[in-house]
């Protein structure tokens, strides 16, 4: 499992020696956490648990020397902005954000409270930080994808789907920019002689419409950037016989055909080290933005059979997990 390494973080997250930990004193530190997920989404618990456990390993215990204020905002941009305003109003010592929309919303409301982000696509071109190695200001964190993955997703989809003619790349424009992936995606599409189709979606209705259009004729495929509406996307792809590749493994585990991307939980563990260092006096602007250190490929054999696809040896040999 997770056997390949992937783009070591720029500058690396230097280990924080236990011997160097200063006494925390009696003041309870306040940590804000803004999650663009619904509170009952099963993904939220492992994300929060990984972050909380990693903080505990570094000496921060919720209810003892720190307090965590969590806001679950779903994927509604207005809820995200309102939750960001509420968290900033609490004046926490630091705020952890997830995905671009939440990070933008918090940064627009404070340039003084430190922010550590998880899951951004392109923090430089989006204007959040000027440089990766020294982001400056009050913000740093852990980007989620490396730009070349756009082409990699399309290449993998073409390997497992003979006769691919056109592929839509599905994303929610409110939750993050797509531009970082398009150059490699379009380069791969030209090389493979596949028509590339941007597919911005914000709702189940738009998802259904886009996938029905792909399934009307043979040769349609889908690359999924959206992290919400998982059940709707997976179901629509199955009903319309559209093979899809996803950037996060939980899609394949929930019934999607193939996933290739970083472990979605690991950045939350790693983010705890930056939160710890900032609470102990380091400046967020001096801590380099980091990228994933590993990726994983998950193949759902049951879904492949339902789509009439034979998983080629080139996929089998590289898969970290095969779901039967």
Image (cartoon, rainbow, N blue to C red):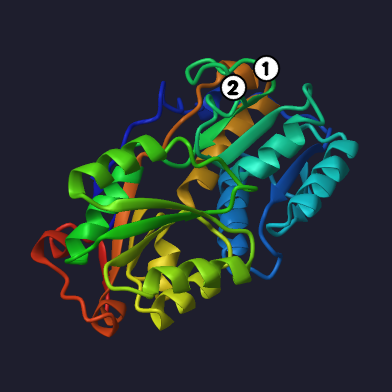
From what the image shows, is residue 306 above or below residue 297? below
* Secondary structure state at the residue bearing disc 1: loop
Q: On the picture, is 40 further left or further right than 68?
A: left
Q: Are marks 2 and 1 in contact (CB under 8 Å)?
A: yes
Going 38% across and 75% down the picture, which residue do you hit?
A: 216
Q: Could you say which quadrant of the image residue 166 lies in?
A: bottom left
Q: Nearer the viewer, mark 2 or mark 1?
A: 2
The residue that label 1 is drawn on is 137
The residue that label 2 is drawn on is 129
Viewport quadrant of the C terminus: bottom left
Going 47% across and 79% down the picture, which residue do you hit?
A: 235
Label 2 crowding class (10 Å Cα cut-off): few <14, some 14-19, many 20+? many
Identify the mark at residue 171; answer none if there is no mark. none
- Mark 2 / mark 1, whichever is N-terminal: 2
Q: On the picture, is 21 further left or further right than 95?
A: left
Going 48% across and 36% down the picture, which residue do you hit?
A: 179
Residue 120, percent from left and from top: 54, 39
Label 1 crowding class (10 Å Cα cut-off): few <14, some 14-19, many 20+? some
Q: CA distance from mark 2 to mark 1?
A: 8 Å
Residue 322, percent from left and from top: 25, 71
Residue 230 appears in the figure? no
């Amino acid at each position: 499992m997770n056997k390949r390494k992937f783009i070591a973080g720029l500058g690396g997250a230097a280990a924080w020696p236990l011997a160097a930990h200063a006494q925390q004193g009696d003041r309870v530190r306040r940590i804000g956490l803004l999650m663009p997920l619904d509170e009952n989404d099963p993904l939220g618990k492992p994300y929060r648990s990984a972050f909380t456990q990693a903080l505990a390993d570094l000496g921060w215990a919720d209810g003892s020397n720190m307090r965590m204020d969590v806001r679950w905002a779903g994927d509604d941009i207005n809820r995200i902005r309102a939750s960001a305003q509420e968290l900033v109003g609490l004046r926490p010592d630091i705020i952890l954000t997830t995905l671009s929309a939440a990070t933008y919303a918090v940064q627009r409301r404070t340039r003084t409270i430190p922010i550590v982000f998880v899951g951004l696509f392109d923090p430089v071109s989006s204007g959040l930080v000027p440089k990766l190695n020294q982001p400056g200001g009050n913000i740093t964190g852990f980007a989620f994808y490396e730009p070349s993955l756009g082409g990699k997703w399309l290449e993998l989809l073409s390997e497992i789907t003979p006769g691919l003619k056109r592929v839509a790349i599905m994303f929610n424009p409110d939750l993050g920019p797509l531009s970082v992936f398009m150059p490699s995606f379009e380069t791969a599409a030209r090389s493979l002689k596949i028509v590339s189709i941007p597919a911005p979606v914000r709702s189940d209705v738009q998802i259904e419409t886009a996938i029905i259009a792909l399934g009307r004729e043979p040769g349609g495929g889908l690359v999924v950037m959206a992290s919400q509406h998982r059940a709707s996307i997976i179901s629509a792809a199955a009903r319309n016989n559209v093979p899809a590749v996803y950037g996060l493994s939980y899609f394949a585990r929930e019934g999607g055909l193939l996933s290739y991307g970083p472990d979605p939980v690991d950045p939350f563990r790693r983010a705890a080290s930056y939160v710890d260092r900032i609470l102990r006096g380091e400046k967020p602007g001096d801590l380099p933005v980091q990228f994933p250190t590993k990726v994983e490929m998950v193949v759902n054999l049951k879904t492949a059979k339902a789509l009439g696809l034979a998983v080629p040896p080139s996929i089998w040999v590289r898969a970290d997990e095969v779901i039967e």
